[in-house]
Image (tube, rainbow, N blue to C red):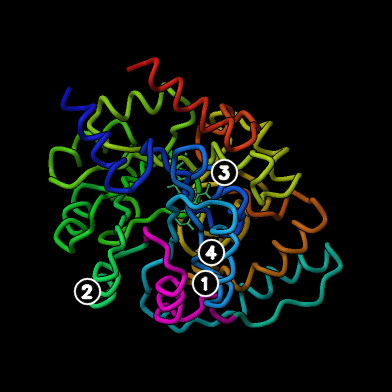
């Protein structure tokens, strides 16, 4: 009974029917994906961390044309400037791959992240009712500004300590990111190893430690995972990988094909793509740059590998593409997002 109540309460707080969230996914969320998830009674999220402010406003406008339901916008919390590092070793390593693909030699990278303050202005202008974030906690003034506009705030935690810090900062709910999750690790209060806690262990410990609702993410792909998260103490769930193979997702055909062939043991955690640990399907790029100290700090490594990753994506060459994926990608269904959401709702309700 208590379980059903918190589930309902979070849905009401978010203004939706079912607290099942399509995860924000930088680079692959499209307005169609976000709107389909929201229209089906869940919550769609715009993964906007790398978007320029004007693009955030434009993207949100398109979402609003497709749905009048709530949706979320997600950003990375601001990061300290990367330590000064000599990029020459990385550029030399990258040059071999550039040559292999017939690209111009790599250039010294710059940060690919737009100004956080200007992105926040765009979030406010967009009128989105929900703001989610990862990689840290935005400054108190930003959280207060968004709260004053009535926005619901969702912060990402990868262990109990981070969940408590988010609660103390005044967020409305905490998204737990289990170690199974695809994409970047959100860990911010400790070295990333301290945030490698699986969903089964993380959700009940966070639910016991904080009074705000917990939204479970990491490895959840179907009604079984949703029902399990609920029993563990979650008031909602967030699914990323499950939505990557939807026709509305912006993942390229080669990316979707790789996900269709994925098995449970085919992902790795790597810093090679962006400089920050992230989980994705293993390919040549995730295994590159093994030499100690060659990888640049985030986000410079992301900037440095960008031309190679983009060229590979354009050619459908999975060897050098970004293939973020959770550990349960093999359970992907490839359904349209609305149908996937309907099935997730029906399955989890059947399981109680
Ligand atoms: C391709 C991809 C991109 C992601 N980008 C973001 C992002 O921009 N912001 C964010 O908070 N989380 C991001 N995540 C992490 C998700 O929010 C979520 O933690 C994860 O997808 C849950 O695990 P699952 O993939 O097993 O469902 C991303 C995940 C994937 C797979």
Looking at the image, is mark 3 or mark 1 earlier in the sequence?
Answer: 3
Few, some or many residues within 10 Å of mark 3 (<14, 14–19, 20+) = many
- Helix, strand, or loop for circle 4? helix
Report the side of 154 relative to 273 (left or right): left
Q: Could you tell me how far apart the alpha carbons at marks 2 and 3 are, in whole angstroms?
A: 33 Å
Structural distance between the alpha carbons of marks 4 and 1: 33 Å
Query: Is ligand 1 closer than 8 angstroms to the Cβ of mark 3?
Result: no
Q: Nearer the viewer, mark 2 or mark 3?
A: 3
The residue carrying mark 1 has its beta carbon less than 8 Å from ligand 1 = no
Exactly how many numbered labels are in the figure?
4
Q: Are marks 2 and 1 in contact (CB under 8 Å)?
A: no
Locate residue 286, reporting x and y percent.
60, 52
Residue 217, horizontal then vertical, whole percent: 38, 41
- Which one is earlier in the sequence, the residue at label 2 or at label 1? 2
Q: N-terminal of the two: label 4 or label 1?
A: 4
- Asked if the residue at tag 3 contacts the one at tag 4, i.e. Cβ–Cβ closer than 8 Å, the answer is no
The C terminus, quarter of image? top left
- What's the distance in space between the residues labelled 3 and 1, CA to CA? 37 Å
Mark 1: which secondary structure?
Answer: loop
Rounded to the nearest angstrom, the CA distance separating label 4 from label 2 is: 24 Å
Q: Which residues are magenta?
A: 110-133
**Comparing labels 4 and 1, the label whose residue is closer to the camera:** 4
Q: Which residue is mark 4?
A: 60
Numbered badge on residue 36: 3
Is disc 4 in contact with disc 1, using a CB cutoff of under 8 Å?
no
Does residue 197 appear in the picture of this structure? yes
Residue with the mark numbered 1:
296
Residue 290 seen anywhere in this rendered image of the structure: no
* Outermost top residue: 350
Q: Earlier in the sequence, mark 4 or mark 3?
A: 3
């Amino acid at each position: 009974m208590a379980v059903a109540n918190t589930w309902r309460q979070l849905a009401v707080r978010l203004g939706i029917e079912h607290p099942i969230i399509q995860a924000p996914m930088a680079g692959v969320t499209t307005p169609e994906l976000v709107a389909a998830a929201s229209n089906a009674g869940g919550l769609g999220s715009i993964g906007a961390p790398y978007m320029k402010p004007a693009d955030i406003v434009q993207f949100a406008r398109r979402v609003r044309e497709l749905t009048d339901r709530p949706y979320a916008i997600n950003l990375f919390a601001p990061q300290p400037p990367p330590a000064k590092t000599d990029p020459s070793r990385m550029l030399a390593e990258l040059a071999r791959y550039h040559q292999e693909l017939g690209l111009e030699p790599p250039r010294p990278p710059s940060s690919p992240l737009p100004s956080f303050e200007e992105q926040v202005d765009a979030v406010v202008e967009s009128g989105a009712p929900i703001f989610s974030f990862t990689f840290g906690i935005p400054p108190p003034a930003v959280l207060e500004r968004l709260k004053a506009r009535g926005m619901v705030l969702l912060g990402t935690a990868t262990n109990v300590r981070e969940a408590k810090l988010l609660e103390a900062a005044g967020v409305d709910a905490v998204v737990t990111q289990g170690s199974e999750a695809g994409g970047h690790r959100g860990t911010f209060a400790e070295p990333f190893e301290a945030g490698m806690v699986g969903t089964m262990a993380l959700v009940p410990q966070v639910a016991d430690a904080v009074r705000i609702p917990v939204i479970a993410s990491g490895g959840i792909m179907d009604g079984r995972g949703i029902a399990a998260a609920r029993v563990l103490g979650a008031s909602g769930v967030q699914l990323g990988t499950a939505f990557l193979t939807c026709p509305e997702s912006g993942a390229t055909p080669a990316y979707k094909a790789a996900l269709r062939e994925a098995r449970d043991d085919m992902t790795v955690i790597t810093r090679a793509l962006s400089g920050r640990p992230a989980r994705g399907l293993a390919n040549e790029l995730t295994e590159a740059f093994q030499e100690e100290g060659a990888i640049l700090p985030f986000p410079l490594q992301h900037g440095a590998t960008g031309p190679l990753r983009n060229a590979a994506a354009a050619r459908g060459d999975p060897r050098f593409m970004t293939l973020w994926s959770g550990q349960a990608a093999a359970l992907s269904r490839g359904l349209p997002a609305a149908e996937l959401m309907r099935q997730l709702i029906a399955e989890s309700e059947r399981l109680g």
